[in-house]
Image: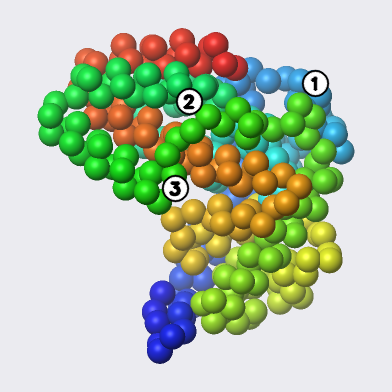
Amino acid sequence: MAEYGNKKVLVVSEQEIAHLNEVMKSFNSNISVAMSYVRHTQKLTFRELEKRFSGINGNTLKRYMQQSYQSMRPIHIVAAYSWVTMVPMTAFYYGFKIKEFYRGMDDNAVEALICLGRLPTEMLNQFLNMIFSMLSDTSKSEFLEFRQKLESEYGVIEDHSDLLPPEKLDIEEFAIDYYRSVAVTARQFRKEYNISVETASRLIGLSEYQYHVLEDINRIVPMPASIGFRAKLGFKLDSHANFTSAMKTFPEFHKLRQVQHVRDSLLVEALRRLKHHERGPMTKVLISLSELYK
């Protein structure tokens, strides 16, 4: 992003848009694979998932998790599913490469991390302290620096029991709140960076008409999950969580996304600093903890 005078300007090249179009060709398949992987890892049946939502049935969710299903996966469905499973929304964009989201972790550690969304903050801090005590002085200093920088940007990790999803999430109410927030924040973002509707629509893969609908707070129309990933890549954002910051019915969802980012980042950073022979036993501790909170 550049600045001219007092105005921020985002310049997007044709090459960047072409690259995005190429990257997104397998997006629907990636989403289905990741959603299915999380369901299997958490040992959730479709019957159990049905009980966690109202307004969507198990058969519809099953179709979204099938690679052969050609229709789009709506972004509000992926968001709601990420909340119910307590897995960061961005992780679902990775598909077969979901393990890359948890960089440097082995299969066992990744599966444990996917099941740790409900782990109490006090227990998480105790686990981090255990790892910290095993690090060299240099690694301790580097980890502390990483943690301070992360928490200065996103806030310190805190008790998130009040950010858990409702026992039964109303998918229609969630969709209304989600898309209204996107409409408000997308328009603010576009105006702040002097981005035209034509550029914004091409960047996130919508027609100009669809983009106008996206920014209309009075029209609730399901949009493809790909718009989130394209926005993150195309606008070069560290996160697209700000687009949920205007949610009023379910503000806990937005807050949780920030908390999840801090929790997961700290766990992965701490684990990767262990020596190989230390990481295995600590991963077993992590797996034991994950079993308690599935």
* Residue at the far left in the pictured view: 137
Q: Amino acid at mark 2?
A: Thr
- Is residue 54 left or right of 120 when viewed as pictured? right
Q: Is residue 255 above or below residue 273?
A: below
Please rate how many residues cluster around mark 3, counting C-alpha atoms within 10 Å: few if below 14, some from 14 to 19, many from 20: few
Quadrant where the C terminus is found in the figure: top right
Q: Residue at x 46, y 71 (%)?
A: 16
- Is residue 255 left or right of 123 when viewed as pictured? right
Q: Secondary structure at mark 1?
A: helix
Q: Earlier in the sequence, mark 1 or mark 2?
A: 1
Residue for badge 1 = 47
Q: Amino acid at mark 3?
A: Tyr
Relative image position of residue 166 (x, y in whole percent) = 74, 31
Q: Residue at x 48, y 25 (%)?
A: 121
Whether pointer 1 and pointer 2 mark residues with C-beta atoms closer than 8 Å, the reply is no
Q: Residue at x 84, y 45 (%)?
A: 172
Image disc number at residue 154: 3
Relative image position of residue 276 (x, y in whole percent) = 22, 20
Residue for badge 2 = 121
Please rate how many residues cluster around mark 1, counting C-alpha atoms within 10 Å: few if below 14, some from 14 to 19, many from 20: few
Q: Residue at x 44, y 47 (%)?
A: 154
Instruction: Using the rendered view, name the quadrant where residue 285 is placed.
Output: top left
Instruction: Using the rendered view, name the quadrant where residue 41 is placed.
Output: top right
Q: Is residue 88 above or below residue 212?
A: above
Q: Is residue 192 above or below residue 175?
A: below
Relative image position of residue 213 (x, y in whole percent) = 77, 69
Q: Amino acid at mark 1?
A: Arg
- Is residue 269 left or right of 142 when viewed as pictured? right
Q: Secondary structure at mark 3?
A: helix
Q: CA distance from mark 1 to mark 2?
A: 30 Å
Q: Earlier in the sequence, mark 3 or mark 2?
A: 2
